[in-house]
Image (tube, rainbow, N blue to C red):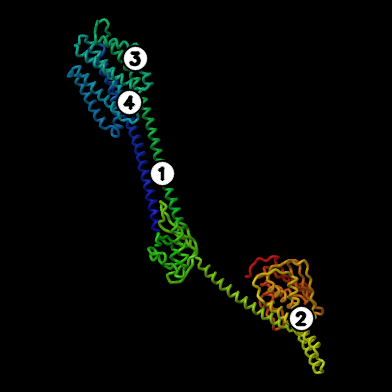
Amino acid sequence: MVQRLSLKRKFYIAIVGLILIVLFFGGIIVFASYANIHRYRALNKKIELSHHISLVLHELQRERGTVVGFITDNGNFTAQDLKAQRQKTNKVLREQEKFFNRNSHRFFPEIVSEARKHFKYLQLVRIRMERGQFPLNTILENYTKTNFFMLGLIADFATESSSPVLTKNMLAYSHFLYLQEYVGLERAEGILLLSHPKKILTERFRFSNLLALKTEHKKLFLHYANRTTRQRFLPILKEKTTQDILTQENLLLHPSGATRMITSDDWYRILTQKLGQLEEVSHYVEEQIVAGIAHQITRAQRWFVLALVLVGLSVVAFGVLVFLFLRLYRVETQQRTILDKHIIDSATDTQGTITEVSQAFCDISGYAPEELIGHNHSIVCHPEMSRKVLADMWETLKAGEAWQGKIQNRRKDGSAYWVYAHLEPLRNTAGKIEGYYGVRIDITEMEELSLAVQEQEHQFRRQEELMEHQNRLAQMGEMISMIAHQWRQPLAAVAAVAGSMQIKARMGRFDNAAAREHADKIEQLTRHMSETIDDFRNYYKPDQQKTETNFARLVDGVRMLIENSLEQKGIQLKVTLRDAHLLSTYENKLKQVLINLVKNAEDALVERQVATPWIQIEGEGNTLCVTDNAGGIAPEILPKIFDPYFSTKSQKDGTGLGLYMSKMIIEEHCGGTLNVQSRGDQTRFCIQLPAKDTNETM
């Protein structure tokens, strides 16, 4: 039981361990998938924020250009234009603020806080600009500072993606927005240079740096942009407007004549047109990023659902496994309980010390488990058990082979019981014997029954011998009667010869010739009487082995013994033998049966005083029949005719053993059959024998 509980605990530990492993890795996948979903959703919100920022950037870029035009006072940018542009900028700022209010607490509270500071400061710059408190360069720096702050936010967003494709798109988007910002700065700085052609070299140098940074971000954008994005952007570079801008950029950096310079209004218009084209490209890149994020979110959601399903299925599978195990364990426990209760088994170490026993072993031996475990198996060995068998058993087991056989054991109360044992060696993984295991069957009842059967057989043999002895005595009585009949005539003849000798002697006429004549006669008669004695002695001589004979020899031997008795009683004996086979049988026993059948017929004929009595002996092949006309046997008596001690004779000397012993001799000793038929006034007993009988005397 300890081992089984240990096995159960081990299974639970393994199952719990597997469940924890599955839950751990499944939890990692679920958490990672959920984290990806959350990260991509946050990134999606930041892309939305980037969209709002880009709108604000575009409007601030326009507002910055308008401010420059208004301050330079070139006559084309009025206060009304500046006011209208500020209204547009404020509108996108309000939309952005609404977006902040909806999402800042979940995704980017720090970004919102910092952005609000910049926009608040921008409002202050506007007010001071209207009051003339800031020079133009400072105003431009403040606008640019706000724009670069927002561009920095977008650039930071690009580092938060775990998808290489999405990261490249976001980097391309970030550099493209920087490109737009530098184009916007180029527009503002160009207006300044065109409005004041006599600007010092420092401002042109700043303009040159601006163009260099713009070119660098353009290269970075083209490096990270995918093929379709580049295809949308490259045609813009080939347009006439772009070429005109490049020409004017060179003129602004290296002025060679005022006639070739365009006006600040034209410069503003061309650059604004350029910014509009770039804005379309930025929207396209933004859409690609949004689509990529949506794809990643969908993918992460699929992984999340798949992970949940797998974890759920794993838990269900483990649950089913545990249920099946418990069910199988319950069935196995029931089976083990049944086996433990009914199978007599035990295990020992190599020295024969008991290590495990079943309840059935304890029940049959009368010992408790703790009284057996730790003790040598000889504790239940019966003292009368054959030492040779035990030595052979241990020799076989130590040789690594299985042994089986009967063992006599002793209970705790000293009584004996028998088992049929099957013992086998127990081997470890290396193949070395580490103990022995035995399964036994209780055969005590079989052994006791066997002993009882042997005792019954012994009693039956004694009873059979007794009945055979009784039958032999009865037959001897009849034989003596037959001897008397056989000797009566010779004795009368001897008496007559003796009387004749006496008369002749008295008359003096007893001479030598008469003496020899009478002596020869007496010798002949005594020889006949001696032969009769020899025949009866051979008749009762026990058969030691089978001999070869035939019905003619058997009938002749019996006929000599019974014929005289039958003649005196007027019973005709008919003998018919045809095609008799050679037999291998016990001749004297067969003669006893044949004489018994004839004597029974003789007694019935005499008792019933049949007018013309006869007995017929017929032999053909392997069958010998004795038939009489004594009136037959009644149907209700016929089934009992061969029962022991059953007799139909009215005389007191009938034993009822003759036919019973005759049937036993024929069927058990001679290997044949003895049957009876009764029809009309005739009764027919038939003996059928094998031609060559190979059975031994039982």
Q: Quadrant of residue 350?
A: bottom left
State which mark lies toward you, 1 or 2: 2
Q: Quadrant of residue 636?
A: bottom right
Local crowd size for mark 3, using a 10 Å CA cut-off: few (<14), some (14–19), many (≥20) = few
Q: Secondary structure at mark 1?
A: helix
Q: Secondary structure at mark 2?
A: helix
Three-letter amino acid code at the position of disc 2: Ser
Q: Is residue 548 above or below residue 142?
A: below
Does the rendering let one see residue 62?
no
Please give the residue where the numbered disc 2 appears in the rendered image. 565
Three-letter amino acid code at the position of disc 3: Leu
Q: Which comes sooner in the sequence, label 4 or label 1?
A: 4
Please give the residue where the numbered disc 4 appears in the rendered image. 170
- Disc 2 from disc 3: Cα separation: 158 Å
State which mark lies toward you, 2 or 4: 2
Please give the residue where the numbered disc 3 appears in the rendered image. 237
Three-letter amino acid code at the position of disc 4: Met
State which mark lies toward you, 3 or 1: 1
Q: How many marks?
A: 4
- Disc 2 from disc 4: Cα separation: 142 Å
Local crowd size for mark 4, using a 10 Å CA cut-off: few (<14), some (14–19), many (≥20) = many
- Disc 1 from disc 2: Cα separation: 106 Å
Query: Which quadrant of the rendered structure holds the C terminus?
Result: bottom right
Local crowd size for mark 1, using a 10 Å CA cut-off: few (<14), some (14–19), many (≥20) = some
| Callout 4 touching callout 3 (CB < 8 Å) | no
> Residue 313 location, x and y as percent?
42, 43
Q: Residue 139 or 206: which is nearer the viewer?
A: 206
> Residue 406 location, x and y as percent?
50, 65
Q: Is residue 94 left or right of residue 507?
A: left
> Residue 526 location, x and y as percent?
74, 83
